[in-house]
Amino acid sequence: MKYECGLCGYIYDPATGDEEHGLAAGVAFEDLPDDWECPLCGAGKEEFKPAE
């Protein structure tokens, strides 16, 4: 499932991960570190909601 940042609209897609920040493809949103932040705006995981 993809998750969208409620502040800037960034979509976290587990199929692509966040390799720029050391997270390989295949990492589910729920498995991201608690201190992971949106790579665009710096929002915390609590700002993300499931993408439609």
Image: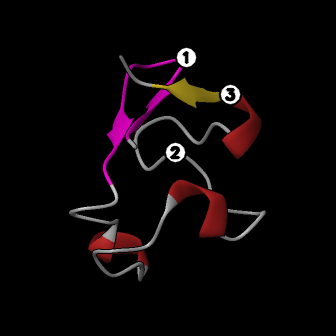
- Is 43 or 49 nearer to us in this picture? 49
Residue 11 within the segment the image draws in magenta: yes
Q: Is residue 50 visible?
A: yes
Question: Could you tell me which quadrant the N terminus lies in?
Answer: top left
Of the image marks 3 and 2, the number of the one nearer the N terminus: 2
Residue 45 lies left or right of residue 27; in this view the side is right
Of the image marks 1 and 3, the number of the one nearer the N terminus: 1
Q: Residue at x 64, y 36 (%)?
A: 43
Q: Please say if the residues under marks 2 and 1 sit with CB atoms less than 8 Å apart.
A: yes
Residue 37 lies left or right of residue 18; in this view the side is right
Q: Residue at x 30, y 72 (%)?
A: 20
Residue 12 lies left or right of residue 30; in this view the side is left
Q: CA distance from mark 3 to mark 2?
A: 9 Å
Q: Which label was assigned to residue 38?
A: 2
Q: Residue at x 44, y 19 (%)?
A: 8
Residue under label 3, please give it: 47
Q: Please say if the residues under marks 3 and 2 sit with CB atoms less than 8 Å apart.
A: yes
Q: Position of residue 13 (x, y in %)?
A: 31, 50
Residue 51 within the segment the image draws in magenta: no
